[in-house]
Amino acid sequence: MTNIPPPAEELRILDHELRQLDARRAQLLARRSWLLGVLRSAKAPAPAWGPAQASAQTPAIWAAPAPHPRRPEATAPGVQNVLLVLGGVLLTVAAIAFTLVSWGHLGIAGRAAVLGAVTFAALAAPVPLLKRGLRSTAESVAGLGLVLTVLDAYALHEVALPEVDGTGYAAAATALLAVLWAAYGRSLGALRLPLPAAMATAQLPLLLWAVAVDAGHHTITAALLVTAAFDTVVALSVSVRSVRVVAAVGAYGTGAWGLLAAGWLSWEATGPSAATRAAALLALAAAIALGAAWRTPAAQASSGLSLTGGLITVAAAGGVLRSVLPDVWTVPGYLLCGIALLAVRGTWLPESVRRGLLWSSAGVQALAVAWALPLVTVVLVGPAGWVDSVWSGAPSDARDAVTVSTPWPSNTETAPLVLAAVAAVMVLTFRGGPHRSLALSGALGLAWAAVLVLPATLELPYPAGLLVPGVITAAALTAAAYSRHARPADDESARPTGPPAHPGHSPITLTTLGLALLTSLHLVALSLASEAATLAVLGGLTALFAAVAVRRKHEIRAVSAAASLAYAAALACATGASLDWQPHHIALLVLVVPASAALLAARLKDATPTLSVEITGVVAALLAIDLAAMEPSVLALVLALCGVIAAGTAIRPDRRRLGYVAAALFVLATWVRLASWEVGSPEAYTLPVTVPALIVGFVRRRRDPEASSWTAYGPGLSVTLLPSLLAAWGDLDWPRPLLLGTAALLVTLVGARQRLQALLVLGGGTLALVALHELAPYIAQALGAVPRWVPPALAGLLLLALGATYEQRLRDARRVREVLGRMH
């Protein structure tokens, strides 16, 4: 309620503030002069008179400071607004109390006189107040007058028209009050309150009238939408900001209420007649939204309103189709209406409106695809239930094959049509432009999903359910193999100026390759129901991916080669199970895969396919080891064969380090074989490692004389000497210590002959420990005969000897220091 005053009033306020500033400046100058006097007095010499006189002068020096004026805690306009609002509220409360309580104490003439006089005075008072520039006061009094008109309407009904229905009277009264308040506000243009109040009151007449005449849901909804249309027109055409704000709030509020009611009526419609009436209401709501989008100046608001209008249009048309079509065609009907919105492309509509309508069409299509996704998930994941009942028998049809552990969604038979329609729209919509590749990739995914769910939807026979994903896999893999490798450019302006993109950057290639792999997994899961189907599917997939890996040379070669080897390993397992082989026998058949992978990797030139093939071979080898784990003799054979494969791979210059892996596999195979023979001597496990290690160390010393003996011979000797030494200390027989001591003596002599530190230390240490082990019983017997005081005495002598040696060294150091001092 704070208003800018007229120029004369504002000049008066400025003069008053300047006078206050001058007064404040004078007070501050006086205070400054007093403080300067106090400081001068403190520096002056003490007075000659006595203490009494000095005491008498003290109050003059330390006089009380001048009072500071307090700053006001509230501004003048704020105080003014509080007083005006409080006054208006009190008068309003008094008027309400008078009307409700004291009305009956007056006669008809008195009542009319009082209400008429008070209302006329309240409505007329703003005129002179505005002329005097008291705008805030005029607003408060005008607000009181508007409240009094409401009380007048209530009093008129209670006295003169008591038999009239209250709701109908309220509808007429609110309509009349809205008109009167609008006229009053227009006549007194300086007042801000009457016009927004009239706009807020105008929200009620139609709704109250519909309730008064006991109208049905459709009429009440129509009243709400008509009110929203009126609000929209006012919000877009009136220049007064407060009126626009109230009208916009009313439009959104009543429009949303009416839209929800119309949507509920459309969804609950049981026949074409009811659906048509609900569609008419939805069409009215769509017209309001699209009209507002057309007229609004803000582009974002226009796009949002047109998006809402497009969705409402689809709901209206789709509701009519739903009432005449079976339930299974509900989603396709709405989708058809959403696709029809694409016709606005290239029309004369504003860009923001067209953009919103296109987004609404995209939203409808996205919702339709989301509705079909549960069915796609069931078809894709459902066959995994055959893992628990492998080869239990072929199902009757394709639907039974995918619903092993999951139920079939109801009313989803039209899902393939929905997916295919959206895919076609994407292809036709993005026939050019920078997003064409991504759109085509999305369309491929939707078309793939449509074809994938088709056999189960149509309940085709089980062989057809296998044939369709097989064809999809072959087609997708072929498309990935023969698609353009570089990122496509739709026109010269979009074509990159730099070097061509990497082949792996093609969205279409990646999409088709991913779909081929996913479909192949789905096909394998489907085939688990039948033994013959499993073998045929795995054999076909192995050959298909192998053919692509051999024929093509770009990025899909790595994936296809790895997939072919993986399916070959699965085929080996399935073949062995079909022949009733034991798992450890199947492991020998699986080893064909890592052997083939090693041979194939040696022929490949590219690094990526080579790495993928080798990784797949390693995984297959681990699978073979796992299958043979329960049979030690076969496990040893499998480990040895894996060592042979690793050794063959280590021949390649870039895989030399696999020689260590091969050696470890050979040693592990030997240990497993010895364990299967129940051999307990550690030398049987260590000597097969020591002998090759010493040979390798000897060869290295011949090639590199500077190599350390610890590097060449240390690991090999330690592998045998240390475990044998531990075993000898716990062995009560004489052959092992004798043989170990002899071997240690030979190592020591060779080390002394060749002057090799590792041999001397390891051989000599082992020989000493073996000798100590053999002398241990005699040493213990001798210690038993020695008196108990001998060990402490020997320890004391040792400490005395060490102390004497330490003292001698200190004396020598002291003498050296004295000599150096004399030299200085």
Image: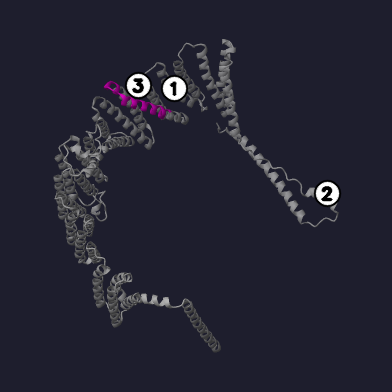
Nearest-to-viewer mark from 3 and 1: 3
Task: Compare residues 75 and 124 and report the one nearer the observer.
Answer: 75
Q: Is residue 239 visible?
A: no
- Secondary structure mostly taken by the magenta-highlighted segment of the chain: helix
Classify residue 526 as left or right of residue 209. left
Q: Position of residue 98 (x, y in %)?
A: 58, 18
- The residue at the point 73 percent across, 49 percent down is 33
- The residue at the point 65 percent across, 40 percent down is 71
Task: Compare residues 380 and 722 and report the one nearer the observer.
Answer: 722
Residue bearing mark 1: 204
Tag 1 near tag 2, CB within 8 Å: no
> Alpha carbon of mark 2 to alpha carbon of mark 3: how far?
98 Å
Q: Earlier in the sequence, mark 3 or mark 1?
A: 1
Q: Quadrant of the C terminus?
A: bottom right
| Magenta part of the chain | 250-275
Dot 3: element: helix
Location of residue 339 (image quadrant): top left
Tag 3: residue type? His
Location of residue 65 (image quadrant): top right
Residue 218's mark? 3
> Alpha carbon of mark 1 to alpha carbon of mark 2: how far?
83 Å
Q: Position of residue 807 (x, y in %)?
A: 52, 83
Q: Quadrant of the N terminus?
A: top right
Tag 1: residue type? Leu
Q: Position of residue 438 (x, y in %)?
A: 26, 45
